Image: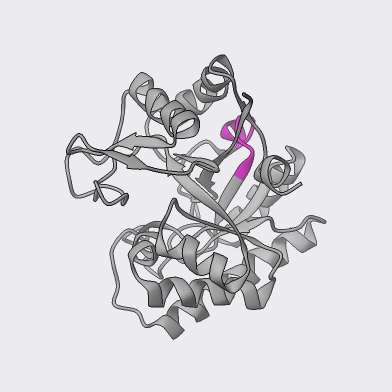
Amino acid sequence: MTYKVDLNCDMGESFGPYTIGNDEEILKTITSANIACGFHAGDPTTMRKTVRMALERNVGIGVHPGLQDLSGFGRREMAITPIEAFDLVVYQIGALSAFVQAEGGRVQHVKPHGALYNMAAISRELSEAIAEAVYKVNPELLLFGLAGSELVKAGERIGLKVANEVFADRTYQSDGTLTSRKESNALITDHETAIRQIVRMVKEGKVTATDGTDVTIQADTICIHGDGKTALEFAKVIPGALRNEGIEVQRIESNKYN
């Protein structure tokens, strides 16, 4: 049996004189890029440069909307209403889409960032607002969401194509949510452990939660984080490790919707 999976990474997170991650090199290893839109990270020049690099590599471009929390990198929860969530997603899709259009490309997907992503994973109201924002801007866009989450369900209900996302470098709770970054065991830093986890998620549809229980999971796209100390090293290792397991890394539009 042949397995196929998309590999995505959050990027475009530099700001002004501050450089975060190694986008140019990581783009050589992934198939989809989630580009920050200026709310949680990024700035107009960074957005343009990242879009251009992604197009040069034929990497699928995704809008990565976050909460308006630059100092907290969008990872702090905020008590926003569904209409506020709708507005901030529409706003950020518009911002990145303009750069993509100016560079002669098109947007492939939308994936919320950080706290907004985690909040939408469990809140039906927020997830429906986000899915509606995506649908009303462009119903052809893919919506990335945590596998099995409320966001994925909301996208399916409104008629969007969805991609169930799993994480290479994060641990899971027994309900399928990600372990909070406040916990010491939230991140997986050992590459071999991370690779074993993603191979099992792709081939068996299972992930072991922190309490030892198995959680059923669907893996359409795998996320790696571009801001970690060993992010580039990890990004270089994953494609080869997956191929050795009979898993082909292929852009989401090709492996699922064409």
Residue found farthest to the top: 244
Residue 152 point in image, percent of width and height = 49, 60
- The type of colouring in the image is one colour
Residue 227 drawn in magenta: no
| Quadrant holding the N terminus | top right
Q: Could one spot residue 20 in this view of the protein?
A: no
Residue 25 drawn in magenta: yes
Question: What span is in magenta?
Answer: 24-32
Question: Residue 94 lies in what quarter of the image?
Answer: bottom right
158 or 192, nearer to the observer: 158
Q: Could one spot residue 186 in this view of the protein?
A: yes
Q: Residue at position x 47%, y 44% from top?
A: 218
Q: Residue at position x 38%, y 36% from top?
A: 206
Q: Residue at position x 48%, y 77% from top?
A: 129
Rendered view: 3 above or below 100 = above
Total tally of numbered discs in the picture: 0
Residue found farthest to the right: 104
Left/right placement of residue 34 relative to residue 214 reads right
Rendered view: 257 above or below 156 = above
Q: Residue at position x 44%, y 36% from top?
A: 205
Residue 253 point in image, percent of width and height = 70, 47
25 or 116, nearer to the observer: 116
Residue 171 point in image, percent of width and height = 29, 39
